[in-house]
Image: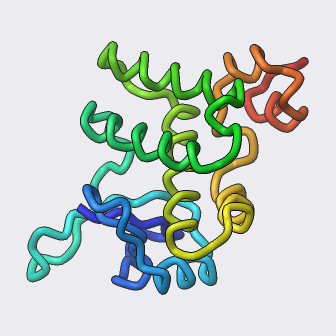
Amino acid sequence: MRLAYLDDPNQLTDENILFAAGERDAVDPHAVAHVLETGFLALAAVAADDPEEGATTVDPFTDDAKLVDADLAAAERHLAMIPDALQYGPNKAMLVSIRSTNAADDALSAAQRTFLDHELLEAALVRGGLSQEEAHQAVVTVFPHGSNYSPDVIRQFSTYFSDTYFKYWGMTR
């Protein structure tokens, strides 16, 4: 299975594949440049086991425990490379929440999945040659502003978040 961030899954090409499942550390810098030039909004997971049959779009938001564990580990590795990111209260709370949800074998919330996808895409762009700041600025254009932290975390750390985060979740301060 290969993962790509695309406007339309029908546009999948080898140029816009960021990483292959199980090979999240291998990123093609040309793919990163292509994706940044063309833009990307949705995560599409594509099964490409039989090139003769063509690619088949499958559900990218699987909550398979092994995949969530791998995503969580990759997100933590990425955050560990950013000074104080693992100690930042909202990040810590999201990681604990994801780990707890996964251990209970429950489905991840939209905020939990978005948090992971945000960190994974940011890490892929950094590995592809962007600076951390460039990668972060690119990724914040992909996901709706405020969507990568859960309402509980936003409430718990309300002084860390702008009104945009509250509005996204339909909350007031």
x then y, percent, for residue 77: 48, 45
Residue 173 vs 19, above or below: the answer is above
x then y, percent, for residue 85: 67, 39
Residue 87 vs 13, above or below: the answer is above
Q: Is residue 81 left or right of residue 124?
A: right
Q: Nearer the viewer, residue 70 or 45?
A: 70
Residue at 48 percent of width and 65 percent of height: 5
Q: Is residue 106 left or right of residue 80?
A: left
Q: Quadrant of the C terminus?
A: top right
User: Picture quarter containing residue 92?
Assistant: top right
Residue 7 vs 37, above or below: the answer is above
User: Picture quarter containing residue 147?
Assistant: top right
Q: Is residue 12 left or right of residue 47?
A: right
Query: Exactly how many numbered labels are in the figure?
Result: 0
x then y, percent, for residue 167: 83, 32
Residue at 37 percent of width and 77 percent of height: 12
Q: Quadrant of the N terminus?
A: bottom left
Say how the picture is coloured.
Answer: rainbow
Residue at 41 percent of width and 66 percent of height: 4
x then y, percent, for residue 96: 51, 20
Residue at 64 percent of width and 52 percent of height: 143
Q: Nearer the viewer, residue 61 or 103?
A: 103
User: Picture quarter containing residue 155?
Assistant: top right
